Amino acid sequence: MSIIDTLTIAIYLVGAVQGIVYGIILLRSTRVNKLANRILAILIFLFAYRLLVQTARLFQLGDYDIWYYFMLDLSWVTGALLYFYVLAQVYPTFKLKRSDLIHLLPVCIQIICSVFVRLQNLYWDDTRESLTWLGYWGYVVWMNYSTIYIIASILIIVYAYKSEKLLPPASSVAIVDPRRITWLRRILLSFRVYFSIVLAVLVVDFLVYRVSLGNEYYYFTRFYYYPFFIGISLLTYWIGLEGFKRKDWEPTRIKPDLPSEKREELAELADRINQLMETQKVYTNPQLTVGLLAELLAVKPYLVSQCLREIFQTKFTDYVNEKRVEELQRLLKDPVHNNLTLLALAMNAGFNSKSSFNRAVKKHLGVVPKELRTEE
């Protein structure tokens, strides 16, 4: 066995073993997002299984046995599983329904075609005439060409695009770590890019080698056949690791869209809040509350909170503290205040304690307060 074969086997096994381990962990995870974790576990198990089958083939084990054909038969389900996973992540109440079975139609078609092609072995006597026209060309196109993997790649790309359309904009996601949506976009992009490359290689190689040059074409002997599974191994490793890290993340909650009239009302209120902040600098009042701000605006407190959440995409405390930090920065630039300590300026800006001041500066500016001024 060559060094390249040994290295290939090592990469396959690392991906497969890691996929199995994290797949089991995800399958047994029942705290949150149980369905999403289980779907991801199944996807990882399928990748790990493909890697194990290909590893066995490198040892010249299991060529064209039931395990090999089972791997082929399931290759068209990856896109659907990816779509179901995103659905379960974005909509925590999602449950697989009978209508969702339409997404499994491709894999059913593949199984039917695969069984038909394999049945041709019962009639084959080493002559083309022993098979029907459909049987002969079905076998050639299905088993010798890269047809299965071309269609599988197309399905994954299509479902990755379809899944990305499910992801809500950042403004409509509430009470959830925004990294959840970032992770889903990243995994969909990885699948789309990798299988686009795979599809391009498959099509170009077939057109050049078989169509243009007229050479005999067997997909499983092509130069990229085993490197293709190295990419699968890396995907399996990455998805398993990242999925494990996120298995206990809180479910995504999608905020309902506001009626246009309500949004216009809140937008008008937002303009009034900004004007009040600029003209009267009410944020410098350390006792400012939502209720007091609502009283100054002559509206109900819940409208102020809703406006800050929907229009400003923030909470009252964060909004006011950001204004206070901006005021502090203006005070620091004025030489008149050079004789005042940083804490004194913070109190003038509206902060009512050193701890709240420290937290606000760190959150909104990303620095510790002492970095705002070289000396107090």
Image (spheres, helix red, strand yellow):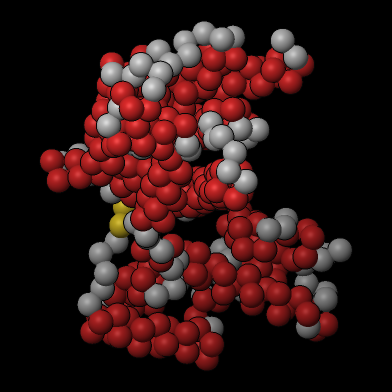
Is 34 rendered above or below residue 11? below
Query: Where's the N terminus, which quadrant?
Result: top right
**Left or right: 325 as drawn, with respect to 114:** right
**For the point 59% across and 9% down, which residue is it?**
59
Q: For the point 14% across and 46% down, which residue is it?
A: 99
Using the image as rendered, state which of residue 191 and residue 312 is in the foreground.
191
Between 114 and 189, the one nearer to me in the picture: 114
Q: Most extreme residue toward the right, as rendered? A: 374
Number of numbered discs on residues: 0
Q: Residue 313's x, y, as percent?
A: 43, 68
Picture quarter with the C terminus: bottom right
Q: Position of residue 16 (x, y in %)?
A: 53, 20
Identify the residue at image location x=30%, y=57%: 254
> Image check: 173 left or right of 329?
left
User: Does 293 sit above or below residue 25?
Assistant: below
Q: What is the x, y in percent for residue 141?
A: 41, 37
Q: Say left or right for 287 vs 321.
A: left
Q: Residue furthest left?
A: 98
Residue 362 percent across, percent down from the top left: 65, 57
Figure quadrant of residue 260: bottom left
Q: Is residue 248 above or below residue 315?
A: above
Camera sees residue 106: yes
Tell me if I can see residue 16 in this picture.
no
Give the residue displayed 45% in from the left and 66% down from the top: 314
Say which of 150 and 75 sits in front: 150
